Image (cartoon, grey):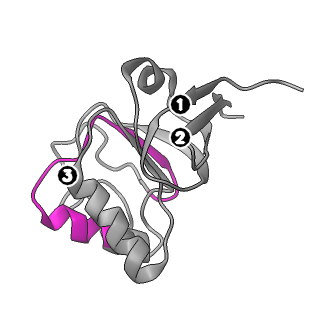
C-alpha cells in the first residue's frame, strides 16, 4: 500500500471532495470568465482559456472580479459544471459567497480551503486530490 502525501489547509467552507487538480497560475473570474453552459474557461486573456473546471479540484491564487462572480459560481455549481473543490492562496469572500449560495439554495457541496505556499505548491496538475472536512488534503500521483 502506497501512502499518499498529506497536507493541511484552513477550511473556509468545510466539506469532503475529490477530483483531479486543475492548477491555475492566474486568478479567475467566474462572471464572464467561465462558460455557464460548459464550465470551460472562456476568458481569452486567461492562460488556461479552453480548460474545463467542472468536477476538478480547482487550485488558484484567488478569484478575480466583481460580486457577480459569486452568482456565476453558484450557478455553475447548481448545474454540475463547477469545481468539486477550490483551494486558494488568499481568502476570497466572493468565492466563499458563491459556494455558500449554492450550498444553501441547492444543497451542493464544494469545499473551499486556503493553503499556505508549501501546500499550494505541492499540488501538481492532474493529481488526484482528496479533501476532508477538517482541511486534510491527500495528494496522489499525477494521472494515477
Residues packed near mark 2 inside 10 Å, few (<14), some (14 to 19) or many (20 plus): many
**Region of the chain picked out in magenta, as a range:** 54-74
Say if 78 sits above or below 8 in the image. Answer: below
The reply to whether dot 2 and dot 1 touch (C-beta < 8 Å) is: yes
Figure quadrant of residue 68: bottom left
Residue 101: where, in percent of width, then height? 32, 72
Question: Which residue was labeled with disc 3?
Answer: 43
Location of the C terminus by quadrant is top right
Task: Give the number of the disc on residue 135.
Answer: 2
**Element marked by disc 3:** loop
The reply to whether dot 2 and dot 3 touch (C-beta < 8 Å) is: no
Residue 132: where, in percent of width, then height? 61, 46
Question: Which residue was labeled with disc 1?
Answer: 8
Q: Cα distance, mark 2 to mark 1?
A: 5 Å
Q: Is residue 128 visible?
A: yes
In this view, the mark in front (3 or 1): 1
Nearest the viewer among 108 and 124 is: 108
Task: Give the number of the disc on residue 69.
Answer: none
Left or right of 33 in this view: 134: right
- What residue occupies the far bottom of the structure in this picture? 105
Residues packed near mark 3 inside 10 Å, few (<14), some (14 to 19) or many (20 plus): some
Q: Cα distance, mark 3 to mark 1?
A: 31 Å
**Element marked by disc 2:** loop
Amino acid at each position: 500500500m502506497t501512502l499518499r502525501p498529506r497536507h493541511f489547509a484552513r477550511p473556509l467552507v468545510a466539506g469532503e471532495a475529490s477530483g483531479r487538480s486543475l492548477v491555475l497560475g492566474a486568478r479567475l473570474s467566474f462572471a464572464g470568465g467561465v462558460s455557464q453552459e460548459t464550465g470551460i474557461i472562456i476568458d481569452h486573456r486567461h492562460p488556461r482559456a479552453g480548460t474545463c473546471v467542472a468536477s476538478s479540484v480547482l487550485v488558484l491564487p484567488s478569484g478575480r472580479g466583481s460580486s457577480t462572480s459569486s452568482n456565476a459560481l453558484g450557478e455553475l455549481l447548481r448545474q454540475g459544471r463547477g469545481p468539486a473543490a477550490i483551494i486558494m492562496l488568499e481568502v476570497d469572500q466572493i468565492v466563499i459567497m458563491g459556494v455558500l449560495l449554492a450550498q444553501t439554495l441547492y444543497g451542493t457541496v464544494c469545499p473551499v480551503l486556503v493553503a499556505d505556499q508549501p501546500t499550494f505548491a505541492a499540488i501538481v496538475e492532474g493529481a488526484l486530490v482528496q479533501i476532508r472536512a477538517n482541511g486534510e488534503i491527500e495528494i496522489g500521483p499525477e494521472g494515477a
